[in-house]
Each structure stands twice: as structure tokens, then as C-alpha cells.
Image (spheres, coloured by chain):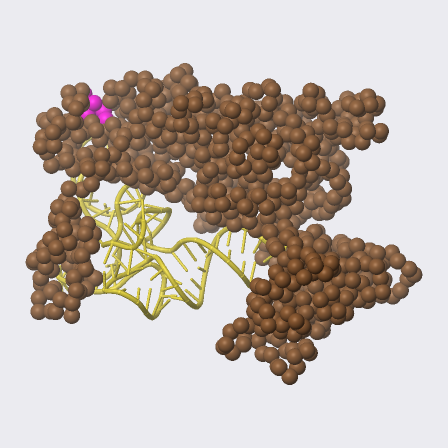
Amino acid sequence: MDEKYFAEVVEEKWQRHWKESGAFEVERDDARARFYCLEMLPYPSGYLHMGHVRNYSIGDALSWYKRLRGFNVLHPIGWDSFGQPAEQAAIKRGVNPKDWTEENIAHMRGQLQRLGVSYDWRREIAAHTPEYYKWDQWFFLKMLERELAYKRLSPVNWCPTCQTTLSNEQSSGGVCWRCGNPVERRDIEQWFLRITAYAEALLEDMKEIEGAWPERVLTMQRNWIGKSTGAFVDFQIKDGEDKIRIFTTRVDTIYGATAVVVAAEHPVVERMLAEGGPSALKDEVRAFAERVRATHGTSVKVAGEEQEEKEGINTGLIAINPFSGEQAPVWVANYVLMEYGTGAVMSVPAHDERDYEFAQKYSLPIRRVIERISHEQPVIEHDPDHEDQSVAMHQAFTEYGILVNSADWSGKLSEDATREMAEFARESGFGEPATTFRLRDWGISRQRFWGAPIPIIYCERCGAVPVPYEDLPVRLPERVEFGATGQSPLAGVEEFVNVSCPKCKGAARRETDTMDTFVDSSWYFFRYCDPRNTEAPFDSETARYWTPVDQYIGGIDHAVMHLLYTRFWTKAMRDMGLVNFGEPVRRLMTQGMVTNLIGETGEWKRMSKSRGNGVDPDDMIQAYGSDAVRLFILFAAPPESELRWQETGIDGAVRFLRRVYSMVYRWRDALRDAPVEAPSADDFTTPARKLRHETHRTIARVTDDFERLHLNTNVAALMELSNALGDFQTKPEGATAAELFAAREALEALVLMLAPFAPHAAEEMWEGLGHEGGLLGGGRALWPSADPALARKEELEIPVQVNGKLRGRLTVGADASEDELRSAALADERVRAWVEGKEIVKVVVVPKRLVNIVVR
RNA sequence: GCGAAAGUGGCGGAAUUGGCAGACGCGCCAGGUUUAGGCCCUGGUCCCGAAAGGGGUGGGGGUUCGAGUCCCCCCUUUCGCACCA
């Protein structure tokens, strides 16, 4: 141990030590409790950014903590190395996507190693390697067998900028998740995964993770799945065979239906237009439907933009309300979506805001059929003399209430009627109770090169034939021509495309689409458990030891995409018998963004190269050392909050590390003579007792805050302990044996608890304190434990209030009784001055907390 | 528009259950030491006030002996959803 701390030297030394001793390399060990700490795997863009550093610092701190507590900690890393940037680089600069990707990985791996993150590097994986994507393909075939994968012609979200299709999740809001540009619609044959088969389970199983995942994430997923329960009801078309099936959550309002409104793409419209001779009305409807269809999906709603104006046209068709027998006109309108429910709704203007707005515009009748149950003045006027007529309403009444004007159902409560009427529809054969979801199946076909090829062969005779398992992996060819054709570049590679049919051996063509990269990331953390397995994606027994993931850490941006897909994938794997649980992640933490000022604008925005407000982690490590950078990042803000980058803060971290280091250096020689066994309580001087109290209190706090991931307050607690050590005695000379014992206890605890935040410095100091083999080398869990008796204060300062205002303080024993506190408070001189001459109404005594004297 | 979360010094942020508001750090001020300087050490640092004391957690009201914390109204910010029938 040198007198001065040189981060470069110390960090390099311990990084080498960790590598050589295999400090972070772990194996399954059924006798030991495991802890699986996982950070979201990075895309190898080429450079680490501060968001990565923050993510890995949080995970690394937790991993170290768990290791020091004796857990067998799996902490792996890998690369989400398929995807568009590599292909863009290939198109723009003519580089090979594989070379580009692997160079990036090499560079980023170096950065991670300089950061000293405690990964088991033997388990590193990369999605673009055949050893990995073979299993993507294997899973695809398994899904196909279980009918969880299927192909269909489908309108897809097409991003013209990225020249690819996107899933619903990736085109949320009508814009591409990657480039932010508007998305178009196209009809393309593509492969889907049947995530909707698990819609109910994805909702239901949230019970298991409730409280352990951020509520926002669960809410976002819940909204995305969008379950709603209601009923299907069939409206017969008058003078025709057709029925229009509508979906409603408010069948109790059906007597108020004054129209049926369908989507522009609804079959009933198409049939009407196809039938019979020409008519003026048909032309109008056709023109309207075409206009709506053209704008649907392309009329992209930018955030904050006004909702589209409701427009519609009467088709002239008449539908019969099966409950009332009444006739209702059939309209086509732009506000009814073909993708949701049945693409048709009953229009109940009195009790639905959209229908109300629509009815106002087109003067459709408004009929009230639900009344507020309150005895108070009804909010909406209602004229009893005109029960059956359109009634003046200033807005729709959308709450539940009591049914009126609804034949025999009148007088029932909405809650009951909704259930009973759906049941009645079933019995009567014109409908049924129904549940719909907003969630759509996951389209995974991408017309791209840099992804896992979908293992399908198209044969004229046999159709779409799965590639036999023994032929996996279907490898990506090395040489490819790139061009923005809208087709996968693979289509231009003859030797890839032209194959023989696995069934009939005849000439056949290979599928040229590749898989969405979210497939790769849906199961990667299972692969870490058994990364070199050549027989299976992973060994189930091994995975059973390591999974589910105990703590997952990553950005909120994956709240609905990755985190929904991986939940789905895990449930599918469970049903395949590969794992024995359905929720892959026990606890999730979503870390906040790292932001920086943009120039002089005063605006804090996410760091990024293009904005020019990025900070290079390498520069920071070089200037301050990895430990100081990480310590600062964890200290500056709670992990979930935004972190505003202020470089002056790192100086504080550097100072703190140096202070601790020099204290250790100053004490180390004297501590060799410190007693091994704790001296008897009487031997400790008052300062020594205070220090011991501070040490044990800090251990208790830090241990507790680790479980809650309050890492910023943990660093603060360590700084306090270090300050207490500074106050204790600056020099070891003249210290008694008991004082030496207390000093060593404090220093060792401080160093050990510092390890999760500044592991290199902690290793160096631990060694400086005379320990060999490193923090993880002794085969013993070193995390200190708090002695509750010492953590408790011997004496307490109890504030005394008079009428809620602080007037004095009492110093009392920690176990002073209520009576003792009361009389001590009343006897206190300063307090007496405030109480004198007044009537004491009440004395509130909260033991260990305060005394409040209420006077008049 | 709907829904959720959050508003605390000059700044980042502390304050498990209602119980001393501002821990810890940055910055700033003063002093010391060393130096060319960075550095290091000591003390101070919510506001008003000479002090006693008073005020203070976005604004207003309420509950309570006691409110940053609970309830109601309003304002602001951030995030999510946005014709989902």
C-alpha cells in the first residue's frame, strides 16, 4: 500500500487480480444460495455511454453486496448484436455487418473491463453468432409445432426510413421506435408469434410481481394488453342475410342505440359496395371509405396534436336492434377501428362521449336510458314528459346508473344489467358475453439481413416446410448485396435462397426474412446459465438453479416491448417444459436517464452524441478513475431518478476516497497491535463507544438500504462513518487497546461496505489492513453484521415542544420511561419559562421521540 | 382530453410508521497550510433579526397535541395513454 492513492495503478492491479483469480467466475452449486443480478444487454453501438455506466454501476454494486454476503452471484454480460445499425453501416460505408459488430464489441468489452465491472466473462454471449441464433431458430420451430408461430398476409407497420416492418409495440403512436419517423401500412406475408394466447396470463401473473416491479411498468403493460369485458351483440341487416356483430362494454345502454357505426374496412361495407348496380349513395360511401382507409395509419398523430375530427356517412343500410326490435341506420365512420373488437359499434350518444360528439355533428337522435342513482339534483337535465324522445343533454352521461326506457330491463342497476343482458343475448342466440384485448400478435418478420434467418423453406408442392432441427442453424451468408429494395437483402443471395425441400427434395426457396431482434433478447438470460450448450438452448436443471432473475436493471424504454415479450417467452417455455415458472424476473428496477446541459440553453436532455451533450466514460475514467466515477453516479441521485451530470461532483467522490485511503494508511501499522477479541465494555472510552455505535448503526443502515436499492443514501452513510472516524482521533499514537479495536472495527466495516461502490480502492485498502487473497478470495462472506445493542444509542436527545414549538432538549437514557420523560421535560428550565403561569392541558410523550406540552 | 407520479436551500438530494426539516455531497464565504497553481486542513453556510425570537417544504384551506408526510381545492412540471367501443 502506497502512501498516496493512484487510481490508475490500483485499478489496473486489481482488475488483473480479478481476472487471474477468476474472482467473478461462478458455477452452479446446489449447496449455496444463488443470486442472479442482470442488467439489460447492450446493443454494440461502438461506445459505452453514461447510461450504460449507470446501469452497470447499479448492478455491480448489488452483485458485490450479495457476494460479500455469501451468495453465489451470477452476473453476466453479452451483446444484443443483431439489428439495423450494423446494416446501415454496411449500406452507407460498405463494411461487413459482422466485422463492424465485432469491432464494436471488442472496443466496448475493453471499456467495460477498464470500468472493472464484475462480470463472469466466460459466459459472454452475442446474438449474432450462429451458436446463439441457432437457438432462436430452434425456438421458432418449437413455437411452430405448438401453433404459437404462424404466417399470414397482414397489414404491417412499415417504416420507410428504416425500410422494414415493425411490431405494434415498436410503432406505438404511429411512429417508428428507432428513428421516430411516421409509419405506413403495407400488406405483407409475415410470421407472427401468438402472444395473444397469453394475454390473460400476462395480466393474471402480474400478481406475482406486483410490488417488485415499478408500478408504472405494470400499468403500461396493463394498458397495452388492454383487456375489456363486455358483450358481442348481432344486429341483423334489414332485407338481407348479413349480420353486424358489435362489441360493447355497456350492453346496458343498448336501448339508447340510435345507430350502428362500422369501420371503413368492415366487410359489410365491402359487400354492399360489391353488390348490385351503381347508385349515387354507393359512390359516396365508396369515396368516403377509401379516403378513411388512405389516411388510417398514415395520418400520424404527433404527440400533443388534436384528435382527428369525427366523420361519417350513412350507408342507407338498416340494422335491427335485437333487444328492442328497433331499426337503426348503419353508418361508416373514421373513429371506428377495424383492428379492435369487431370493427363495429352500436352508437349510444346519450352514454358515450364519442357517440355523443358524432350524433351532435350528424343530428342523430340522443336517447337517455341510464339515470343517475343519486337523490341529488341530476347533473343532466331530463324532461319526464318526453321520455321516449331525444332529450337535451349537454354531454354524455357515461357513468353507471339505473336503467330507464329499457323495456323490462328498466329499473335494474347497470352493473347487473350488463351481466344479465349479455347472458340473455347468449340464450336468445344473438350474442354472448365477450372479452377483447388491445394486444395483437407479435409480428417478427423483418426484411433485413442482419438478423436470425427464419428457418422455413417454401416448396411448390409441400408449402411452407420447417427446416429440420438437425439442419440448424440456418446460417447467414457472408457475402451480400445491400440495397433499399424493400426486400430482405438475403433474397439476392442465390446459394442461400435456392435449396431443396426437406420433405420432397424438390427445388424450393428459403424464407429470406429474418427475425425481429427482440426475439434474441426474449430469452438471452437463460442462455447465460449454460452459454456453451450445443444440445439445447440451456440445460433445464442448471437454469432451475440460477433463474428466475432476482434483480433486473434497465431503462424504462423497454417497459412494453422487451419486458412484455420476455414474459410471454418465459410462459411459452414453461409450457414447453423448459422452465418451471412463468415470470422470468423477480424484481425490476428501472434506472433514470443520465442528462446533461445542452450548451448554454439551460435545458437538461439525455446525453447523446448528436446533441453534443455526451460525456465519454473513457475520459472520465482516465481523469478520475472508475471507482470515483461510479461512486459519484450512485451518490448523485436515487437510481430511479434522472441524473444530472455535474462534473464537480466527481471531485467530491475523489476526495472522499482519498480521505478514507489516507485514514487506512495512517492506522494500518498501529492496528497490528489491536486486540483480536473485543475488550470488555468498561475498557472503551467514550469516543470509542461513540465510534462503535456509529459503526454498527451504519452497518445496519447500509444493509437495509441495499435491500431497497437506496444506493445514494448508502454512500452518504459511508461518508458519515468516515467523518465519525475522522472525529474519533486523527492519529493512532497513544490509543488504548480498546480504542484500536474500535478503530479497526470501523475501518474494516467501512472498507467492506465501500467495496460495492469502489471495488478497486476497497480491495487495495483491505489488503492494506493486512488481509490476503482479496475480498472474495478467502471463501468467507465478509460483509459485517450489526450488533443491535451497539447500533442502538445509549443516550438520546429528546426534543421538548411547548404547543408544538421546540423549546428544549433532554438528554436521557435510551430506555427512559414515559413518566421519566414527562417529569424531566416539566423540570427543564428552558421549558419551565414557557410553561410558567399557564395551564397545562396535556402532555404528549412519545418514548424515544419527543415530548410536547400543550398549554393554554 | 384521460390517467399516474412529483414539487423541499444557490445546486444534486436526505427525512421506513405523522414526531428536532435541510443528513450527505457540490458550490459559496472566512481562516490556516503548502504551492506557481490545483491540493489539503479548520470553521461557517434555509430566510428575517444585534439578540430574544419569528418565519419556512409550489399556493390556499382542513384534520391533529404535532403535517414535507394524511384529506380537499388550485397551480406547475414530468411521464404514460390518446378515438380501444
Q: In the rendered view of the protein, which quadrant contains the N terminus of chain A?
A: top left
Examine the structure image and report whether residue A708 is included in the region drawn in magenta: no
Image height of A52 relative to B48, above or below = above
The answer to which image quadrant residue A166 occupies is top right
Image height of A299 relative to A670, above or below = below
- Rendering coords of residue A703 (x, y %): 31, 36
- In screen coordinates, is A351 left or right of A725? right
Q: Which residues are magenta?
A: A662-669
Identify the residue at horizontal 56%, vertical 24% (top origin). Answer: A538
Q: Which tint was used for chain A?
A: brown
Q: Nearer the viewer, residue B23 or A626?
A: B23
The answer to which image quadrant residue A668 occupies is top left
Identify the residue at horizontal 44%, vertical 42% (top origin). Answer: A212
- Rendering coords of residue A74 (x, y %): 45, 27
Task: Say if residue A593 shows up in the picture.
Answer: no
Furthest residue in direction bottom, as rendered: A385
Task: Say if residue A546 shows up in the picture.
Answer: yes
- Rendering coords of residue A606 (x, y %): 49, 43
Identify the residue at horizontal 49%, vertical 37% (top origin). Answer: A585
Q: Which tint was used for chain B?
A: yellow
